[in-house]
Amino acid sequence: MKRGRCKRTLQDISLYLCIGVITLFFILAIIPEVFAPFPENKRFIPYMDPDTVHFLGTDDMGYDIFSLLIYAARISLLIGFCAGGFSIFIGTATGLVSGYFRGWIDDLLMALTDIVLIIPKIPAIILISAFLRPSIWILILILGFFSWETTARVVRARTLQMSTSGHVLSARSLGFSSYQILISDIVPVIFPVLLPKFMLTITGAMISEASLSFLGLSDPTMNSWGRMISDAFTHGGFIREMWWWFLPPAICISGAIISFIRIGMVYEKPGQETMVE
Amino acid sequence: MKKNPLLQVSDLSVTFQTNGDTIRAVTGFSCQLDYGICTAIIGESGCGKSVIAHAILRLLPETALVTGSVQFKGKDLYSLSLEELNAIRGRQIGIIFQSPDRALNPTYRIYRQIDVPLRNHQVVPEKKRKDHILTTLRNVGFSHPNEAARLFPCHCSGGMNQRAVTAVVLSLLPDLIIADEPTKGLDSLRVSDVKSSLLKVKDEGRTLLLVTHDICLAQDLSEELLVMYAGEIVESGKTQDILQSPMHPYTRGLLKSLPENGFIRIPGSAPSYANMPSGCRFQDRCAYASERCNNNLELLNKNGRMVRCHLFC
């Protein structure tokens, strides 16, 4: 009993800590100029060690790394959220239509899902990114397009289950259209499945963005955490063992990913779907 | 001049196609529901009562093959478009499902369960909607409707959910209410609550189609009674006439199986729907069965009562 309570307290602490981390990153992304000691484009002496003025020193171009770290939160979170949202939207719409209407439309959409599912993601993203003009919105579209298929599969399975349930039959008997039933009776019930998927997709997009930036395939004008690690690698940060250059963005990416996953896990507990309003 | 019936079901048959088997759930069901009259369908589990209730509103799954016609106010429900049918569903024909816990949206409070269909059909003006919802909740037996309106289905007992489902249907003021086992799984106190709310519906002059196992409920509420066995009507007529002097051997057996009549069970079990015998479907369990029972027989009119039995030929 005592052990269970202790475990629950630890889980609560970890959850609040993760919510705090994400909130902090969000505040930094919305108003970076308030927290960054220097503007993003202000230059100082290159390769400075950390001191009381430059908490994380300066990079090869003389930019303040701590300020860059704060400004980079905006791009990383924007890519994560937009790609995650895009992916969840396509996946949910596909799964709902497929699972509710069934028949030929289900066969067609699931065949499409299977095709996307078997495409090797990272090589395809690298290939497309290399051919298209580097841009944040193209990156979001590519990352979103290659991560909706698992959501579609999960949503379809839940929709198939829900479409024969009593309350959906009851909604049909009350004269609701298929669209109204999907939005009012199925989406709220499958929401506990969607939220963890959304969080996982955000983290997947953030990791992919960092990987692409590290490979130099992202927009060179945008400053993200992945880009900072790439710069540290290509501009002497690793050789000079300037850990304060590449370690903080890596910690930020890891912290954001762990926090998103932990928050998503809240709705993965069974038996909570009936309580969601 | 005789008024047209509210609902006219003619020769309704429902067949389900499963893996290689053809299940004839309902065969040649016909009935007529007049305005303001309560008609009850009784029979043992699996005899096709609920299938009929679902078939009237075209709620059966795609695997069901439905033949015959269902005329509501002169319109054939099976020839309407989905949009036209949706305008009738809920607003003109309401159905109270069995298993109320599953008939309510688990993510909505009771208030919203009633409010959303009301808004969809625009039954009452927006300003009067809240009062209408609370009055409906009070009418179905919630003594504190404000508190009940705030509850989720998971916070309610089975009886409360049953009343909430009834409130959802009644709030739309339909002309015809189909109550599918409205007292299933309720204690006697809740049964009397449901009975009084259905009596109120009758008093308002609405038409009721009661699908039930509960013969006492059918006796108290209905004027007309249909007795079903293995997917077909075996006897129909005035409720009091049938209950006082049942004609078909199955109806007699059904009434003898009531506790007050000695709990005498009918021997044997219903035939398989995939392999229905020719002739009378009750013959294997009937004490009066003879050679002629192997021949098919239509419903016979016997002094205003309809009965499907060779004993009355």
Image (cartoon, coloured by chain):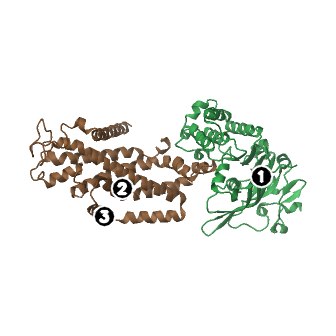
Chain colours: A brown, B green
Q: Position of residue B85 (x, y in %)?
A: 66, 53
Contact (Cβ within 8 Å) of mark 2 with mark 3: no
Q: Position of residue A221 (x, y in %)?
A: 22, 51
Q: CA distance from mark 2 to mark 3?
A: 13 Å
Amino acid on which the number 3 mark rests in the picture: Ala
Q: Position of residue B106 (x, y in %)?
A: 53, 44
Report the chain holding disc 3: A
Residue nearer the viewer, A105 or B305 = A105
| Residue B82 visible, this angle | yes
The residue lying at 58 percent from left, 38 percent from top is B110
Q: Which residue is mark 2?
A: A144
Question: Residue A17 falls in which quadrant of the image?
Answer: top left
- Give residue A192's mark: none
Q: CA distance from mark 2 to mark 1?
A: 63 Å
Residue nearer the viewer, B199 or B240 = B199
The residue lying at 29 percent from left, 51 percent from top is A206
**Reading the chain from its start, which is encountered first: label 2 or label 3?**
3
Q: Which residue is mark 3?
A: A124
Question: Residue A37 falls in which quadrant of the image?
Answer: top left
Horizontal side of B257 relative to A238 (left or right) equals right
Q: Position of residue B153 (x, y in %)?
A: 56, 40
Amino acid on which the number 2 mark rests in the picture: Gly
Horizontal side of B201 relative to A242 (left or right) equals right
Contact (Cβ within 8 Å) of mark 1 with mark 3: no
B51 is higher (above) or lower (below) than A192: below
Residue nearer the viewer, A207 or B236 = A207
Q: Which residue is mark 1?
A: B254
